[in-house]
Amino acid sequence: MKENNDKIESEMSDNHISFTLSDEIKGSIHGDSFYVIMFTCGVCDNKLARKFTKKAYHEGVVIIRCDSCDNNHLISDNLGWFEDKPINI
């Protein structure tokens, strides 16, 4: 992954995908350690890209709300708020 301050771009060729990342992706980051996730909402097929801290993913809860249909997507639950056992996708 390359960092760039313009936008997010993807290129696909021969089963290889590369991305260019920017600060324009929604989400919260504090410090240098963060993840980026790109997925399609299973309810409305809206494509989403978000960033969140590694600490939130590994030690807390990460929920992403779809911009289009307001559906909540549970990405990580290490505090047991929604499941009996910790889960991470």
Image: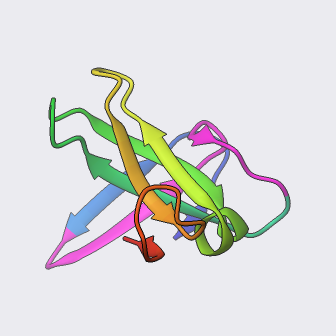
Indicate the position of residue 88 as horizontal and vertical percent values.
Answer: 43, 72
Left or right: 79 as drawn, with respect to 1? right
In the picture shown, does residue 30 fall above or below 16? Answer: above
Looking at the image, how many numbered discs can be counted on the residues? 0
Left or right: 48 as drawn, with respect to 13? right
Residue furthest to the right in view is: 31
Residue at horizontal 85%, vertical 61%?
31
Left or right: 76 as drawn, with respect to 6? left
Q: Nearer the viewer, residue 50 or 62?
A: 62
Residue 23 located within the stretch drawn in magenta: yes
Asked which quadrant contains residue 54, the reply is bottom right
Asked which quadrant contains residue 75, the reply is bottom left
The C terminus lies in which quarter of the figure?
bottom left
Q: Nearer the viewer, residue 81 or 30?
A: 81
Indicate the position of residue 77 as horizontal and vertical percent values.
Answer: 51, 64
Residue at horizontal 60%, vertical 66%?
79
Magenta-highlighted residues: 13-30
Q: How is the image coloured?
A: rainbow
Residue at horizontal 23%, vertical 41%?
41
